[in-house]
Image (tube, coloured by chain):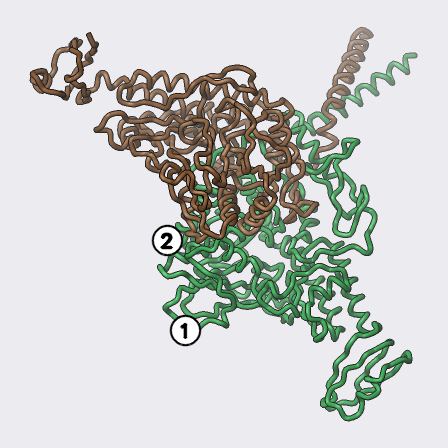
Chain colours: A green, B brown
């Protein structure tokens, strides 16, 4: 009995020590967290919902009948927990949705979480009367100074709803440089929004005039506004302005180490960036422009004032938190993840398309990058695919019809419909699916009935043709007799080998 | 010794019970919070910063040298903790900054806090491919159904960056109803943004034509786009459309129980609302429009797509959380606070101005409100002040010069500069200061040296003049001899009474 008592005392004391330790250790939560506790619990619970690695739940998502947040699945996955794949589904690769960066932020959850009070920044303006967070301004400049992709010295900074809104603000501002209507131009292939946005309101102040190559390059009497997109969307090429003396808008959305070598700091009049392509937060609608000229800047500010009266405070807080994380790591972690992912994807896709006679893809070469301090292989955000065969008139229809992949038609970029833009920036599930479908499409070139192959018999080569299956048609039989080129209709798999 | 032992055992057991209770009660924090803990601690710490009740600190504010968040002070307060008032400061009452609602959200902190993960909704679109949160859509409809201020049946819903962006989208969409350029009009006094936004891009599709009274009301060949603002900004009057057959944009920013009686659900083609005036979150840049016609809606969607590609996900989450709170309380708490505050402010200010011969203010009458189910006294967001004396040509300059209050000049509203709009929606500090200055201004009418009073001696009246202080100057003495009007320079308080 006495031993039992003593045992109880010891047990009790041990428990006390444990609880005191736990209490002191967990004191931050118990003492500090009052109003944020419930929201934090909810957010953590939602984040912990398993969607089989093929989706995620959100705090503002739909709630199921049993009160649980519903999974939102990656492309071509379905089911309550996103565990079922949908083999024959249409894969949308039209949008440059930058979901490939989502796993990065999941890995850095603690340093990028935000807790927002109900009374956070209710006013129209910041304390200094502006629509721009000073802290975010400073963080953006710090990041550019680390990456050295743009010259920030003496630049004015303005924020917009993604680069989208800033493009419109810049066109409007530059159109006022002359009393004559401005001609808005871009080099083909160009980002489609330049055209559609410029034409939307049918302003008397500017007109979209299409490709730079159609303009008189030394015409100094016209107020040209030239979009210079570098790396270019869709094809990832580094670009320079074409027209002499034009007012330029440099769209540098993709001029980050994920997608491009940093060859030198851009030192131009207007340089536009967007959070979408830097951190992947496309839904936050946040972009910024660095502007050299004060009058141009002030007219852009006026446009922003009258168009939306600035960018949401929640968005500026989010951008600040994300950029603080990036700056703290001097960009290394994010760019390593971003470049690594995009490079692997490009290697896989471009290798797949190399084997094709039917499809070609843009050529990009390795270049020295000042940020990485080394040569780097290409890692573009998009594949700019060309259908090489005459029969494949509309490349987007070919890809949709035969691979069930939605791409963006070349005509929207001012190029022919022989081209299609395919996005490589979506989730890993999305890319895996895309790659498999392109592989299948390319492999079908070798087996599919009716596929055309062109080869040139004028080259100093002879061809060995092995029929692995019989059934080659008459055109094939006739084509070998002294013609300079032949079209081969295949009804069976054939292997060609140069001898 | 045995008693001591027993005492220890009991003490220990009691502690155990206490700790077990505390552990179980606080278990949510200890078990669930991982990645959100640091952000929550930071936000709670910032919220706890004392700014003497005359300011607040923010998580994205400036950090002082000692690592503490810096207080951002209310108008005319300064100092590290905002404890010092600045008596002679300029008071900005130009903006309709809805800071008066800030204390409400501080009182409801737990139900309106948000915890946002670093990977929250990175994509361009929601799961259904739209730019609009379904949950928020549903919450907005629920709220309208509670307040009964607008008919939601069969309406399409679109979101914008405040009402600002939606006004532009609506004008653009309605201008396409006819191949002729549309004439954009509003009844004087009108919200200045209608004019400045419509004129900004000099579109060939529409022109701002000013006051509805200048138009031919029965002109059916013109595509009129009429802004109908009810309650009106600046004067709080409930308004109806003036032009027959015009396309109408109903701006209902202030049609909430804080500012207006709800007389009936508005049942019009386009009804625009904004979070700024409902919850006070102006900085979130969130508004919505209810649209009857599908084609009009689709053109507005296209405009939003090309202008900003929708509204930030952070903003939609914030609006959702705030509206969930409002809907849960069936609006009662918020509207009681909002109406109570605005009503008190109006009573105080209008009573002050009643005593004035120099300034008048708009007349608003009590009206039956279906939401409150009772008659309610007025509670407008703005005082629309008229300077009644000829010498006070520019009322905004009078108010600025003599009371150091910045108002918005009447000319911007299409009215004369004899008017000025003064905002009543800022912080309590701001309003107290404003009221004191207006009281002083009015009291000076009776005592100030050099104040001019005009009275007409042709009227069939004689005047009894009581000099309450001696020192009336020569002009006064001479003016009573047979002139039709006299100017009286006062050096002392005088009471006039018609006999």
Q: Position of residue A296 (x, y in %)?
A: 40, 54
Secondary structure state at the residue bearing disc 2:
helix
Q: Quadrant of residue B366?
A: top left
User: Counting residues from the N terminus, which is met first, the one under dot 1 or under dot 2?
Assistant: 1
Residue to which mark 1 is pinned: A218
Left or right, B261 with reference to B387: right
- The quadrant in which residue B89 appears is top left
Q: Disc 1 on helix, strand or loop?
A: loop
Badge 1 sits on which subunit? Answer: A
Which chain is home to disc 2? A
B319 versus B263 height, above or below = below
* Image quarter hosting the N terminus of chain B: top right
The reply to whether residue A491 is in sight is yes
Q: What is the quadrant of residue A154 in the picture?
A: bottom left
- Confirm whether residue A284 shows in the render: no
Residue B97 against residue B456 in the figure, above or below: below
Q: Quadrant of the C terminus of chain B?
A: top left
Tell me the tag on residue B340: none
Q: Position of residue B210 (x, y in %)?
A: 38, 41
Q: Residue at x 77, y 93 (%)?
A: A482
Where in the figure is residue A209, as x and y percent of width and height?
Answer: 48, 65
Judging depth in this view, the residue of B410 and B10 nearest the camera is B410
Label 1 vs label 2, nearer the camera: 1
* In the rendered image, the vertical position of residue A378 relative to residue A23, given as above or below: below
> Is A449 in front, or is A268?
A449
Which residue is at a point 54% across and 52% down the rendered structure image?
A: A164
Residue highlighted by disc 2: A295
Badge 1 density bin: few <14, some 14–19, many ≥20, Cα 10 Å:
few
């Amino acid at each position: 009995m006495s031993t039992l008592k003593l045992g109880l005392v010891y047990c009790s004391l041990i428990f006390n020590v444990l609880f005191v330790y736990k209490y002191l250790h967990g004191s931050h939560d118990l003492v500090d967290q009052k109003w944020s506790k419930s929201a934090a619990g909810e957010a953590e619970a939602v984040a912990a919902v398993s969607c089989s690695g093929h989706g995620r739940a959100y705090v503002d998502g739909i709630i199921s009948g049993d009160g649980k947040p519903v999974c939102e699945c990656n492309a071509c996955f379905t089911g309550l927990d996103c565990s079922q794949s949908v083999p024959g589904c249409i894969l949308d690769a039209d949008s440059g949705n930058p979901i490939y960066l989502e796993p990065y932020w999941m890995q850095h959850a603690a340093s990028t979480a935000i807790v927002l009070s109900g009374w956070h920044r209710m006013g129209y303006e910041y304390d200094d009367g502006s629509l721009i967070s000073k802290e975010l301004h400073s963080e953006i400049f710090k990041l550019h100074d680390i990456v050295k992709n743009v010259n920030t010295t003496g630049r004015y900074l303005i924020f917009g709803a993604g680069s989208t809104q800033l493009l419109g603000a810049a066109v409007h501002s530059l159109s006022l440089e002359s009393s004559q209507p401005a001609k808005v131009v871009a080099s083909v292939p160009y980002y489609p929004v330049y055209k559609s946005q410029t034409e939307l309101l049918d302003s008397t102040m500017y007109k979209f005039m299409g490709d730079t190559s159609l303009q008189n390059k030394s015409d100094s009497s016209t107020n040209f506004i030239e979009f210079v997109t570098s790396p270019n969307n869709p094809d990832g090429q580094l670009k320079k302005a074409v027209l002499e003396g034009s007012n330029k808008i440099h769209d540098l959305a993709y001029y980050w180490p994920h997608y491009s070598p940093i060859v030198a700091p851009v030192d131009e009049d207007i340089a536009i960036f967007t959070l979408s392509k830097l951190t992947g937060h496309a839904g936050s609608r946040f972009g910024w422009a660095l502007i050299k000229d004060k009058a141009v800047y002030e007219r852009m500010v006026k446009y922003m004032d009258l168009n939306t009266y600035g960018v949401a405070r929640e968005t500026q807080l989010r951008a600040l938190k994300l950029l603080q994380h990036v700056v703290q790591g001097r960009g290394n972690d994010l760019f390593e993840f971003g470049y690594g992912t995009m490079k692997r994807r490009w290697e896989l896709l471009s290798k797949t398309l190399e084997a094709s006679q039917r499809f070609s893809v843009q050529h990009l070469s390795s270049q020295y990058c000042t940020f990485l301090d080394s040569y780097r292989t290409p890692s573009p955000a998009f594949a700019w695919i060309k259908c090489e065969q005459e029969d494949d008139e509309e490349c987007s229809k070919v890809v949709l019809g035969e691979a069930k992949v939605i791409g963006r038609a070349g005509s929207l970029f001012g190029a022919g419909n022989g081209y299609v833009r395919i996005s490589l920036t979506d989730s890993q599930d999305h890319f895996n699916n895309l790659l498999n479908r392109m592989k299948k499409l390319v492999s079908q070139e070798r087996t599919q009935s009716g596929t055309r192959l062109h080869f040139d018999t004028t080259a100093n080569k002879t061809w060995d043709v092995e029929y692995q299956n019989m059934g080659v048609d008459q055109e094939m039989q006739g084509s070998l007799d002294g013609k300079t080129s032949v079209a081969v209709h295949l009804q069976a798999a054939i292997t060609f080998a140069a001898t």
